[in-house]
């Protein structure tokens, strides 16, 4: 493939070579009915360069340009900003290294942007479990992102009071770079990159600056959920961290942050108290089938402890169990 590219697919990865191989193959197997010239850029965040061999092998099997770069700074904003800055195309699609894109993924994302004239498109993320869904969520709905909006609908990131809603991540998203970042400034703020929430903060900032963010309902990716991510302890610490993100971002955009802070702290205390009563009344502590009360407590703790960010959550090496779902 020669000449300028229309689309860059950027993948940030950290020590997930098996999962990354699936992600890459799905990107390289796009139907591409729109006839886009595209490239793939893999940004490796692991000091060992664990993604290098996977990228090198798959690059020999395709005519699509595949580039490998390293960025070992342990900050998600810096990492994703590197993916944006490496892009040679005016459109940049982001997909996570544990996601697999449907064959029409790029057609649907780009098509949604073209049909609506929007600046950003975001699509659904389904889930497939490497072993089984957890007993507390047998349908796995808590591991998916489906806003259930019409195709091409604007995503309302803030309500009338400026309260964040519809939390978004960059996995399965497409950006018109010239419209979203016209001054060439970094897309994500590094101060959010250690504690998390950097991607949603960026979406809220783009929304407040007048950028249109639309829902591409047919641009589907599927995330592989590894067993440790379904454990009760992991879900509770993730819930607490997400509540911290919510408080930080809400205060960052609120016209009256003092009032908002008071209301959030009051809500956090109430959630903690009600969650404790619920968890105690239903004998939830120690259960693998009930989590609602403890999740409500985690929401409350996240609000109350928002100045003590959870940050990165330690995870085991991402290796697929033998015979896991593809």
Image: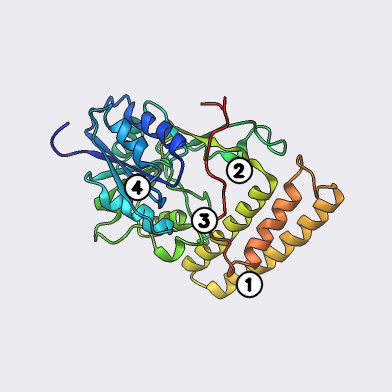
Q: Which residue matches tag 3? A: 159
Question: Which of the 4 quarters of the picture holds residue 22?
Answer: top left
The reply, left or right, for residue 320 in relation to residue 45 is: right
Q: Say which of 114 and 80 sits in front.
A: 80
For label 2, the SS is helix
**Quadrant of the image for the N terminus?**
top left
Labels 4, 3: front one: 4
Gap between marks 2 and 4, in whole Å?
Answer: 23 Å
Q: Residues within 10 Å of mark 1 (few under 14, many from 20)?
A: few
Q: 228 and 51: which one is in front?
A: 51
Q: Earlier in the sequence, mark 1 or mark 3?
A: 3
Residue placed most toward the observer, 204 or 102:
102
Q: Residue furthest left?
A: 3
297 over 323 or under it: above or below = below
Residue linked to disc 2: 229
Residues under labels 2 and 1: Cα distance? 33 Å
Q: How far is disc 1 from disc 3 in space, using C-alphas?
A: 19 Å
Disc 2 or disc 3, which is closer to the eye? 2
Residue hosting label 1: 262
Q: Earlier in the sequence, mark 1 or mark 4?
A: 4
Q: Position of residue 184 (x, y in %)?
A: 25, 59
Residue 244 shows in the view: yes
SS for callout 4 = strand
How far apart, in angstroms, are the residues tagged by discs 2 and 3?
31 Å
Q: Earlier in the sequence, mark 2 or mark 3?
A: 3
* Mark 2 / mark 4, whichever is N-terminal: 4
Percent position of residue 135, x then y: 72, 36
| Display colour scheme | rainbow
Res 190 → quadrant: bottom left
Instruction: List the residue tagged with mark 4.
Output: 43
Assess disc 2: are there few (<14), some (14-19) or many (≥20) residues with their C-alpha within 10 Å of its C-alpha. Answer: some
């Amino acid at each position: 493939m020669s000449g300028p590219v229309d689309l860059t697919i950027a993948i940030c990865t950290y020590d997930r070579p098996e999962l990354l191989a699936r992600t890459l193959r799905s990107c390289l197997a796009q139907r591409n009915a729109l006839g886009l010239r595209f490239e793939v850029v893999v940004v490796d965040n692991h000091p060992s360069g664990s993604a290098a061999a996977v990228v090198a092998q798959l690059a020999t099997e395709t005519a699509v340009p595949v580039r490998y770069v390293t960025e070992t700074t342990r900050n998600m904003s810096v990492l994703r900003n590197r993916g944006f800055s490496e892009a040679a195309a005016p459109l940049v699609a982001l997909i996570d290294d544990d996601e697999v894109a449907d064959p029409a993924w790029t057609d649907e994302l780009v098509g949604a942007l073209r049909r609506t004239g929007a600046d950003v498109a975001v699509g659904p993320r389904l889930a497939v479990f490497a072993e089984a869904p957890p007993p507390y969520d047998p349908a796995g709905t808590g591991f998916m992102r489906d806003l259930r909006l019409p195709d091409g609908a604007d995503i309302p990131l803030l309500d009338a009071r400026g309260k964040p809603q519809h939390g978004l991540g960059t996995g399965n998203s497409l950006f018109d770079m010239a419209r979203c970042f016209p001054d060439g400034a970094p897309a994500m703020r590094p101060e959010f990159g250690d504690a998390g929430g950097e991607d949603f903060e960026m979406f809220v900032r783009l929304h407040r600056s007048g950028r249109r963010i639309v829902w591409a309902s047919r641009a589907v990716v599927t995330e592989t959920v590894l067993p440790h991510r379904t454990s009760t302890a992991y879900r509770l610490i993730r819930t607490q961290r997400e509540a911290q993100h919510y408080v930080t971002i809400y205060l960052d955009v609120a016209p009256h942050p003092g009032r908002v802070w008071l209301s959030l702290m009051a809500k956090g205390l109430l959630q903690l108290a009600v969650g404790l009563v619920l968890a105690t009344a239903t004998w939830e502590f120690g259960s693998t089938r009930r989590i609602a009360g403890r999740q409500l407590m985690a929401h409350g703790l996240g609000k109350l402890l928002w100045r003590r960010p959870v940050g990165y959550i330690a995870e085991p090496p991402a290796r697929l169990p033998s015979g896991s779902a593809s």
